[in-house]
Amino acid sequence: MFELSGLFGIILLALDIWALISIFSSGASTGSKVLWALLVIILPLLGFIIWLVAGPKSNRAAV
């Protein structure tokens, strides 16, 4: 497996933090939030991509 470091690692960390904030501010059930958060934490790149495509959406209305 490859090592995530440097600028790519910092960008991925920022995206994962954004994903976690969005997950916990979504209207999904608590269990669903926990499962999504674990996926993003355990598999940072793959978890983020899966969440981006299929994860719970934020409660904030689109402007």
Image (cartoon, grey):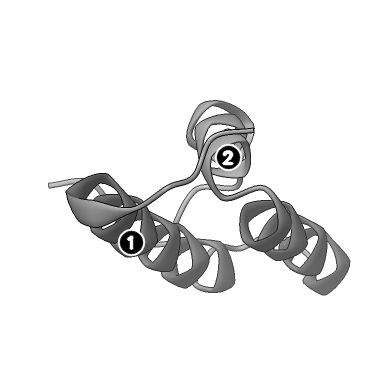
Q: Position of residue 11 (x, y in %)?
A: 24, 53
Give me the residue at 49% from left, 44% from top: 3
Residue at the outermost top position: 53
Query: Which amino acid is tagged 2?
Result: Trp
Give me the residue at 72% from left, 57% from top: 42
The correct choice, above or below, for 53 with respect to 43 in the image is: above
The correct choice, above or below, for 49 with respect to 14 in the image is: above
Q: How many marks?
A: 2
Q: On the image, numbered disc 2 is attached to which residue?
A: 51
**Could you tell me if the residues under marks 2 and 1 are in contact, i.e. CB atoms within 8 Å?**
no
Query: Which amino acid is tagged 1?
Result: Arg
Q: Is residue 49 left or right of residue 28?
A: left
- Nearer the observer: mark 2 or 1; the answer is 2
Q: Is residue 1 left or right of residue 60?
A: right
Q: Position of residue 48 (x, y in %)?
A: 52, 42
Give me the residue at 33% from left, 61% from top: 60
Q: Residues within 10 Å of mark 1 (few under 14, many from 20)?
A: few
Image quarter where the N terminus lies is top right
Give the structural element (helix, strand or loop) at label 1. Answer: loop
Residue at the outermost left position: 63
Alpha carbon separation for disc pair 2 and 1: 17 Å
Q: Nearer the viewer, residue 26 or 13?
A: 13
Q: Quadrant of residue 47?
A: top right
Give the mark, 2 or 1, whose residue is nearer the N terminus. 2
Q: Position of residue 40 (x, y in %)?
A: 62, 54
Q: On the image, numbered disc 1 is attached to which residue?
A: 60
Q: Residues within 10 Å of mark 2 (few under 14, many from 20)?
A: many
Give me the residue at 61% from left, 30% from top: 54
Q: Nearer the viewer, residue 28 or 33?
A: 33
Q: Nearer the viewer, residue 22 or 45?
A: 45
Q: Quadrant of residue 19?
A: bottom left
